[in-house]
Image: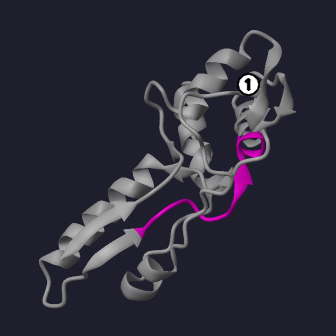
């Protein structure tokens, strides 16, 4: 059977997630420094949930999938690129637009080391199951809209 699904940079409306934290911090006017030398694929929690439901349904079928699959949003960006897009989308819903500052990993020390490139190859899940993640920019719009209490425009 399926041993697991690896994902990265999960994005949702819940506390502790990047978009929510950034929008809250961005209301002050001064933009925060955001790491611009780590690449990855932002992944909407809703997309992960839909993928897990699809995998569960397939596991009950005649040819159940097996192994470990990768699932993340399509496209790669840095944390700074992701932050810039969050605020660009927020503008459509009258959200804040602070001036962000790109910084290095060394300027933002964390207790645990972070990989420079956390991009996942989602080719196997597409090839085996026909599951193709949405572009991360597209998946971001409803998250930002919900965080700002607005209605998504598509």
**Residue at the spot of label 1:** 94
- In the rendered structure, does residue 74 fall within the stretch colored magenta? yes
Residue 138 shows in the view: yes
Residue 150 shows in the view: no
Q: Secondary structure at mark 1?
A: loop
Q: Residue at x 58, y 33 (%)?
A: 18
State which quadrant residue 121 falls in: bottom right
Query: Residue 68: percent from the left, percent from the top?
Result: 33, 72
Give the image's coloring scheme: one colour
Q: Which residues are magenta?
A: 70-82
Q: Residue furthest top?
A: 28
Position above or below: 123 against 74: below
Position above or below: 28 against 42: above
Query: Residue 100: percent from the left, percent from the top?
Result: 84, 28
Q: Residue furthest bottom?
A: 63
- In the rendered structure, does residue 39 fall within the stretch colored magenta? no
Q: Residue at x 77, y 45 (%)?
A: 81
Query: Residue 8: percent from the left, percent from the top?
Result: 50, 52
């Amino acid at each position: 059977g399926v041993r697991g699904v690896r994902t990265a940079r999960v994005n949702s409306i819940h506390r502790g997630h990047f978009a929510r934290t950034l929008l809250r911090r961005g209301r002050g006017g001064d933009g925060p420094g955001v790491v611009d030398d780590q690449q990855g694929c932002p992944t909407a929690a809703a997309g992960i949930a839909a993928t897990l439901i699809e995998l569960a349904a397939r596991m009950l079928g005649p040819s159940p999938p097996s192994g470990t699959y990768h699932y993340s949003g399509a496209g790669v960006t840095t944390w700074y690129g992701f932050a810039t897009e969050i605020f660009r989308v927020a503008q459509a819903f009258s959200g804040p637009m602070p001036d962000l500052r790109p910084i290095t990993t060394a300027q933002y020390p964390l207790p645990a080391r972070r990989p420079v490139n956390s991009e996942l190859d989602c080719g196997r899940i597409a090839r085996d199951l026909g599951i193709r993640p949405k572009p991360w920019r597209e998946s971001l719009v409803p998250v930002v809209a919900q965080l700002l209490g607005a209605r998504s425009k598509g």
